[in-house]
Image (cartoon, rainbow, N blue to C red):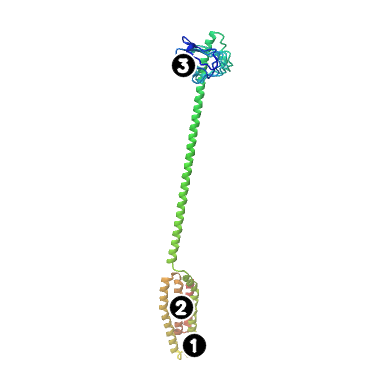
Amino acid sequence: MSKGSKIVVKDYLDRDEFDLSLQSLTNSTLPVKDLAANKKGKKLDLSKNQITVLPDNFVFSMGHLVKLDLSANGLRVLPDNFGNLALLQHLDLFNNKLTVLPVGFYKLKLLKWLDVKENPLEYPVQEVVGLCRNDTECKTCALQVSDFMKKENAEQEKKKQKELELKRAKKEALKRELERLEELENEEKKRIRQEGKAKEKAKRRAEFEKKQSQEQIKEESQCTPPTIAVKHSSRSLPDLNRICLMSALVLFVVAVTLALLVKPDFGDQYVGLTTVTADVLKSVGDAFSPVATTLNTHLLTHAPNIQKSIVSTGELLREMLEICGDTVKLGYELAIQELSQFSTYIQKTSS
């Protein structure tokens, strides 16, 4: 066939076989469509052409073939779906450049004859195919290749299954890891929210306590009486005691002096003076008694903490005035007795 001319495939059909050998056919000039259109041609001879790779649509279109001769073409590889030629019984691949055979050969369950000699097949396929020196060895080759490819397919399926399981396991592990990370992220967000709420609550509580403390201080400043005067009064107690005591002593000295003046030989001359002096001192004592009582009442109401000291001082002064009166009336010796008793009373009161 001259270059550029088109083959009329029906001219090459003899009964059920197309003989297109020695037609210089290439990958692109192979008339797959025309061959597929004529289903009567169940046998196809493409030997001694220049086909290195079968077209993509060859297997799909030529599924009705029972015999195929591709010898002496320079084929480097067969398509992976070559096993879809399910009706194929006779296959000649002699004198090509094939290094491997597709695993899909296990699908060629009707294949009874196979010739693959004069191909640079690699191990282990090279040992499986045998020598193919005669018809019997070619039949054996077909059976052995079919069994071998079944095992290879099973191994590949196991490998694929393991890869799928590994891929699935990795996917599950990745999913669990993502879920764990998401859970940790949610927990962290929850913790941050809780901390924020706790800080806000503590802040509001501190503000409330501060406000309450300020209000309490304000109420205390408005309701509590000043303590400065009380402290001043407390500090002035020793001065008040000393003043009262000194007054009583002055009165006592006056009484003693008057008693010294009252001597037996001058008794008649000073009877009137003694009586008058005694009456005056008694009057002073009587006048001081209600004052001391009033002072005691006010102190009990307004300054309970200093009331006891003032009362003791008032009683002391009243007793001194009474002793002075007795001194004038009774004379010096009786006054001394009164003074001794009064001294004992002072010691008991001080303790």
Q: Residues within 10 Å of mark 2 (few under 14, many from 20)?
A: many
Q: Which of the two labelled residues, at mark 2 and mark 1, occupies the earlier sequence position?
A: 1
Question: Three-letter amino acid code at disc 1?
Answer: Leu
Query: How far is disc 1 from disc 3 in space, using C-alphas?
Result: 174 Å
Q: State the residue position of label 3.
A: 36
Q: Nearer the viewer, mark 2 or mark 1?
A: 2
Q: Name the residue tied to disc 1.
A: 261
Viewer-proximal residue among 117 and 10? 10
Nearer to us: label 1 or label 3: 3
Occupied quadrant, residue 279 = bottom left
Q: Nearer the viewer, residue 224 or 25?
A: 25
| Marks 2 & 1, CB-CB < 8 Å contact | no
Q: Amino acid at mark 3?
A: Ala
**Left or right of residue 104: residue 287:** left
Q: Which residue is mark 2?
A: 317
The correct choice, above or below, for 95 with respect to 317 in the image is: above
The tag earlier along the polypeptide, 3 or 2, is: 3
* Residue 62 visible, this angle: no
Residue 321 against residue 36 in the figure, above or below: below
Precedes in sequence: disc 1 or disc 3: 3
